[in-house]
Amino acid sequence: LKDIQYVLSIYYNKLEYARFDSNVGKYVGYTAYGVKNAERWNNDPSEITGRKAQREAYCLHNVGIW
């Protein structure tokens, strides 16, 4: 169960500009706009805590189903 990964990719106009990866534990930006937003989201502790909790709430909860 430790190798379960939660990834949230954020797209606009078919271009991924930011991603949250539970293994990294923070947002990563891929465009100038994405980098700016990733920095803002990474500085918000409630945002990071909520995304990390999604791994347990969504991924680990459904691992037995899949």
Image: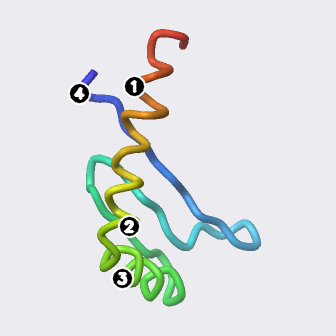
Q: Which numbered disc flags the more N-terminal residue, 3 or 4?
A: 4
Q: Position of residue 60 (x, y in %)?
A: 39, 25
Residue type pointed to by label 3: Glu
Neighbourhood count class around disc 3 (C-alpha, 10 Å): few under 14, some 14–19, many 20 upward: some
Disc 4 marks a residue whose amino acid type is Lys
Look at the image and name its color scheme: rainbow
- Give the crowd class for mark 1: few <14, some 14-19, many >=20 residues within 10 Å: some
The residue lying at 40 percent from left, 83 percent from top is 40
x, y percentage for residue 33? 54, 87
Q: Which quadrant of the view contains residue 50?
A: bottom left
- For the residues labelled 1 and 2, the Cα–Cα distance comes to 21 Å
- Sequence-first disc among 4 and 1: 4
Which numbered marker is on residue 60? Answer: 1
Mark 1 or mark 2: which comes first in sequence?
2
Q: Amino acid at mark 1?
A: Leu
* Distance from Cα at disc 2 to Cα at disc 3: 8 Å
Using the numbered discs, state the Cα–Cα distance from disc 4 to disc 1 in whole angstroms. Answer: 9 Å
| Residue 31 in picture, x, y percent from top left | 51, 82
Asked if 55 appears above or below 33 in the picture, the reply is above
Mark earlier in primary sequence (2, 3): 2
Task: Say which label, 3 or 1, has the lower sequence index.
Answer: 3
Q: Which quarter of the rendered picture does the N terminus lie within? A: top left
Q: Three-letter amino acid code at disc 2?
A: Tyr
Q: Position of residue 44 (x, y in %)?
A: 34, 75
- Check whether the beta carbons of the residues at disc 2 and disc 3 lie within 8 A of each other: no
Q: Earlier in the sequence, mark 4 or mark 2?
A: 4
- Mark 2, residue position: 27
Q: Is residue 55 above or below residue 17?
A: above
Task: Find disc 4 in the rendering and name its residue.
Answer: 2
Taking the spot 27% from the left edge, 56% from the top edge, the residue there is: 25
Residue for badge 3: 39
Q: State how far apart marks 4 and 2 are (Cα).
A: 20 Å
